[in-house]
Image: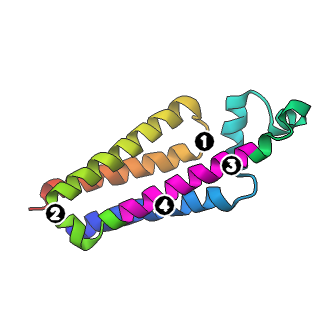
Amino acid sequence: MKKIFKISYLVIAITLVLLGLRWMIVDEPWMLDKVANEERLGMTFDELFQNDINKTLPDYLKQIYRFFGLWVMIIGFFVLGLSSSFMIEIKKIRIILLACVGLMCYSGLMLALIWIPKSPFVYLGCSMVAIHVLTFYLHTKIS
């Protein structure tokens, strides 16, 4: 049970680290979710960036996505550290991990469903929720 618990959180942690890294290194990170972002904007990025007043917007978006990617990656490393074999032996740490990751997964999925329902990140959110449900179940079975 503990091994599967650990592997479940390892998958979540690695996913977060890779997502964060991707948002940090891609030249136009807002294009990773182009369809959902353009739907939310009500216009294409070409239309948005054409206007002279928005000529610095791509640099601003890069800055925001870089910071976002950094924080997602850091959260991934926290989950990775807290899901080590030593840490999951401690029931209170498992509970904290379940609560924090659960809040992140469920609220992230809810916001994605409300604001960007056509995003492929909705499927990722559903996967993370499913993994979280599994780890919650496993937590209840660990003595």
Residue matched to label 4 = 15
Residue 48 position in % (x across, y down): 82, 33
Alpha-carbon span between mark 1 and mark 2:
37 Å
Query: Which quadrant of the view contains residue 80?
Result: bottom left
Nearer to us of marks 4 and 2 is 2
Residue matched to label 1 = 119
Q: Earlier in the sequence, mark 2 or mark 3?
A: 3
Alpha-carbon span between mark 1 and mark 4:
17 Å
Q: Which residues are magenta?
A: 60-80
Alpha-carbon span between mark 1 and mark 3:
21 Å
Q: Residue at x 52, y 29 (%)?
A: 114
Query: Which quadrant of the view contains residue 2?
Result: bottom left
Q: Earlier in the sequence, mark 1 or mark 4?
A: 4
Label 4, secondary structure: give it.
helix
Q: Residue at x 15, y 58 (%)?
A: 91
The kind of residue on which mark 2 rests is Ile
